[in-house]
Amino acid sequence: MKKLFALALSVIMALSMMSFAAADEGTTVTIVTWDANTTAYLAAQKEAYEASHPGVTIEYIDVSSQEYDEKVATMLAANDTSDIFMVKDVPAVLNWYDAGYALPLNDYIAASNYDLSGYVGMESGYNFGGDQVALPFRSDFWVLFYNKTLFDAAGVAYPTNDMTWEEYKEKAIALSGNGNYGTHYHTWLSAAINWTVADGENTLIDGNYDDLAYFYQIIQDLEDAGAAMAFSEVKAAGLHYSGAFGNGNIAMMPMGYWYVATLIQHIADGDYNVSDWGITAVPHKEGVQAGSTFGNLTGVMINKKAVNPDAAWDYISWLCGEEGSKVTAATGNRPAWVSEGVASVMSSVEGFPQDENSIAALLPSFVAIEIPATPETAALNTILNEEHSMIMNREISIEEGIEEMNERAEEVLAK
């Protein structure tokens, strides 16, 4: 796998050198990040950019991962002049923007005719009041994992990239029995109901959660049919989604793309009872575009007090665009930028399924932000998670839980 990564990276670097003009020679672009010495894509990005931009040096400033947001806030408040700050959490960059630390990218985007279409909507997660405060370079959006062996044994057709939730439910029930489950839900709120935001209209901060009832009902129907393990059982057992799917008795599982690397590695190590698998786009509701999903972002922001703001933009536009995304993809990580070229690099990773549907699943049509950043986000998220646990444990009905969500959210939003 490492040899394939190295080969892919060398080709990408060669193409990058032909595609990009060098910035001013003798420029050092300082980037504040976390885990700088242990993150493979950071080393690859630095190497590729410096190779294609002679005379420009990328210098990482490493900050503790566990205290990143707090320490960055302290640095910015002390008038730090580092050029770029990597963004770990969307709420943090909203705070930095509100405090006046972020340089909006609007003028750079307009002046360079920078194409945002490759983010398929993800850039909106960093747009505050019309200011594009950052751009994403990574996004682990959600897909549907499935075990081909169980589908073959049951004589059920594989899922596709255009499958409704009702069709998914029917398949899950048909695949269940004899110790097998048609699908699996991890205990997170996101694994259960975040699909509501994939329509590009609903959000988890709008204060009205009637739309969540549809997804809760599907889960409870599947649990009642024995097609999914009960939430209470998964919670009590402390069952991790990785091991659950790896046991080999779960046919489908919605999960973030990050699980691809874990699955490939465990299969190679012989730890899992899964050998033939694939991914598709997550199912969609009727009337919602096929290939729509949601995800989280990792991005980059230019410091308003940057020493080299123009050079910083040059790096960001490269990193978050096609060429930089190919470099990121070659390390086995999921870039935010969506294109056939990036998908080709991702699917070339050893162990990735080579069927047409799995490769096509790398090209989502729309990626919504899991939960946008607002001053009320933290309080609303707490409410949702509390009521989610009670609904999933069947302590209250779906209707009662939704009513509680709506009433409690109204109080938060009225303050």
Image (cartoon, rainbow, N blue to C red):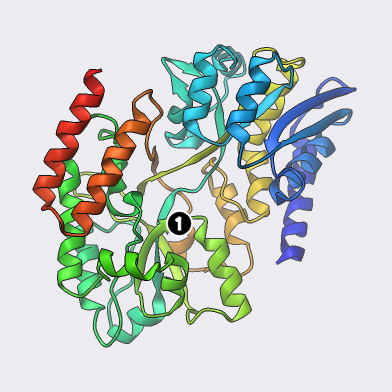
Figure quadrant of residue 58: top right
Q: Residue at x 36, y 30 (%)?
A: 377
Q: Quadrant of the N terminus?
A: bottom right
Residue 271 figure quarter: bottom right
Residue in the image at 37% along x and 80% along y: 249
24 versus 226 height, above or below: above
Q: Is residue 292 above or below residue 409?
A: below
Q: Nearer the viewer, residue 169 or 54?
A: 169
* Image position, residue 82 (x, y; %): 74, 22
**Mark 1 residue crowding within 10 angstroms, few (<14) / some (14–19) / many (20+):** some
Where does the image place residue 221, in percent across and percent down from the top left?
Answer: 15, 65
Please give the count of numbered marks on the rendered protein: 1
Q: In terms of depth relative to the viewer, which is nearer, 74 or 122?
A: 74
Where the C terminus falls, by quadrant?
top left
Residue kind at label 1, given as amino acid type? Ala
175 on left or right of 114: left
Instruction: Judge left or right: residue 11 versus residue 108.
Output: right
Residue 320 visible, this angle: no
On the image, numbered disc 1 is attached to which residue?
Answer: 360
The residue shown at (87%, 31%) is: 54
77 vs 11, nearest the viewer:
77
> Disc 1 on helix, strand or loop?
helix
